[in-house]
Amino acid sequence: MNTLITGGTGLVGRHLTRLLLSKGHKVSLLSRKKENIPGVKVYLWDIEKGLIDNDALKDIDYIIHLAGAGIADKRWTDKRKQEIIESRVKPIQMLDKHLKEQGSKLKAFISASGVGYYGGDTGETRLDESSPVGNDFLGTCVKIWEAETEKFTQAERTVSLRTGIVLSEKGGALPKLAQPIKLGVGSPLGSGKQWMSWIHIDDLCQLYLQVVEDDKMYGAYNAVAPTPARNEEITRVAAEVLKRPLWAPNVPAFIMKLLLGELAVAVLGGNYVKNKRVSEELSFSYQFTTIKAALEDLLR
């Protein structure tokens, strides 16, 4: 199968590209700049100008949409919030338009999404795919994102993977959590009681592969491991794996709010998200079902 990935040069995209190639799939990427990646064709696009290489969409069976401005890269000003939403929505509209113009239809349009759909902080509530959307910025952003995915006309089916915190040793949240621990100053954030719904990058990419290969998958799935963990547990287990002591007090919530503003909800808030549709509807086997197994794999 021919799969085109947006955001393919990012953390998940690179990992997923290697997996798809290893399974015999042909992979091409859309990028803002020309890159040389072995075994992969890289096509240029300009989202703001609505331009895309003429050959990028020829004979494509699947598109996996991973592109989007980082949620936690900058403080959430009104301008930044709009950038976050538009960076996810505009590419979907652009791809649908160009496919329609050339009379092409995909087997599936598969988009990243986020557990922020349920809101930035839902406390102890257990959530699954049927739970209501949150009424804060994160909930609004993901709701718009998924709605645009569902409106994609040039695909036989659309799928959104509501992804939790992706654990990888090569980027994302884990190196930021591990570095202070390695330096001997690691500690939980805020109360430490907030739930973190996580997934090992290997399992996430295997789930994307299954979406490509299983034509019965549709709609939204929670892409999370079976066992969410609290922030303090993840910090403690990481320290145990790294064989470093934890002695510093928790980082006070008010400091995080001063540093990050509204964005602080992304680290002080939390969600207990269950992978109901994955566990009940799919024959999918997680390689990493506990936070200890995941961190031992990634940090040792």
Image (cartoon, grey):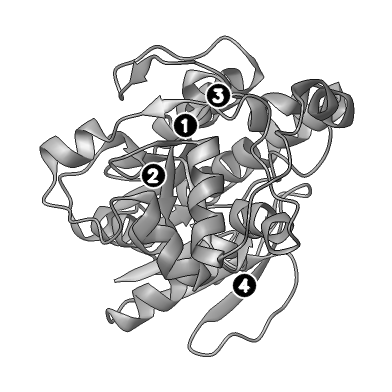
- Where is 294 relative to 115, above or below? below
* Residue position for label 3: 144
Disc assigned to residue 154? 2
Between the residue at mark 2 and the residue at mark 3, the CA separation in whole angstroms equals 19 Å
Give percent across and percent down for residue 106: 34, 54
Nearest to N terminus: mark 2 or mark 3: 3
Contact between marks 4 and 3 (CB within 8 A): the answer is no
Say which amino acid is labelled 4. Tyr
**Tag 3, which secondary structure?**
helix
**Marked residue nearer the N-terminal end (1 or 3):** 1
User: Mark 3, residues whose alpha carbon is within 10 Å: few (<14), some, or many (≥20)?
Assistant: some
Q: Which of marks 2 and 4 is nearer the N terminus?
A: 4
Number of marks in the rendered image: 4
Separation of disc 4 and disc 1 at Cα? 30 Å
Numbered disc in front, either 1 or 3: 1
> Residue sitting at 21 percent across and 60 percent down?
213
C-alpha gap between disc 2 and disc 1: 26 Å
Q: Report the amino acid beneath label 2.
A: Gln
Residue type (three-letter) at the residue carrying disc 3 = Ile
User: Which comes before the other along the chain, label 4 or label 3?
Assistant: 4
The residue beneath circle 4 is: 43
Residue picked out by circle 1: 115
The alpha-carbon separation of the residues under discs 1 and 3 comes to 14 Å
Horizontal arrangement in the rendering, residue 101 relative to residue 48 (left or right) = left
Looking at marks 4 and 1 on the same chain, the residue that comes earlier in the sequence is marked by: 4
Mark 4 is surrounded, within 10 Å at the Cα level, by few (under 14), some (14 to 19) or many (20 or more) other residues, namely many
Q: Is mark 1 on a helix, strand or loop?
A: helix
What is the C-alpha distance between the residues marked 2 and 4?
Answer: 20 Å
Mark 4 lies on a secondary structure that is strand
